[in-house]
Image (cartoon, rainbow, N blue to C red):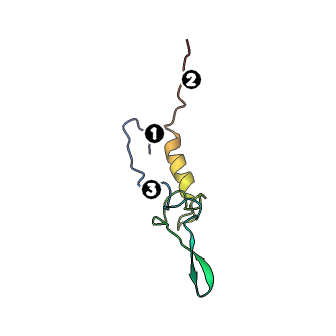
Amino acid sequence: MAADINASFSLYMAHGGTSFGFWAGANILEGRYVADVTSYDYSAPISEDGRHQIGADGADGFEAVRNALGGSYEEPKPPVFR
């Protein structure tokens, strides 16, 4: 996908949540604590708790994005100090 030098893409949501690691808190419901999940994009490559998101087809979303971009990334040259 991104191997073409003129290719472009948009990754709208890389991390699916408003709080990393389910730190949004909790509510009390019928005498028990119930997590307050704030995620609003369930198909982001990285889930709200930081794990790789697995899609409905069973594929790892993070790996799919990384593999699609892998061919176009070049390591920058180290700086030259004088």
51 relative to 10, above or below:
below
Q: Residue at x 59, y 57 (%)?
A: 50
The Cα–Cα distance between marks 2 and 1, rounded to whole angstroms, is 23 Å
The Cα–Cα distance between marks 1 and 3, rounded to whole angstroms, is 21 Å
Kindly state the secondary structure of the residue where label 3 is placed.
loop
50 relative to 39, above or below:
above
Badge 3 or badge 2: first in the primary sequence: 3
Q: Which residue is mark 3?
A: 13
- Categorize mark 3 by other alpha carbons within 10 Å: few (<14), some (14-19), many (20+): some
Task: Report which quarter residue 59 is drawn in.
Answer: bottom right
Task: Report which quarter residue 12 is drawn in.
Answer: bottom left
Q: Which residue is mark 1?
A: 3
Q: Amino acid at mark 2?
A: Pro
Q: Amino acid at mark 1?
A: Ala
Residue 74 image point, x, y percent: 52, 32
Q: Nearer the viewer, residue 75 or 33?
A: 33
- View extreme (top): residue: 82
Q: Amino acid at mark 3?
A: Met
Q: Which residue is mark 2?
A: 78
Residue 79 image point, x, y percent: 54, 21
Q: Nearer the viewer, residue 21 or 75?
A: 21
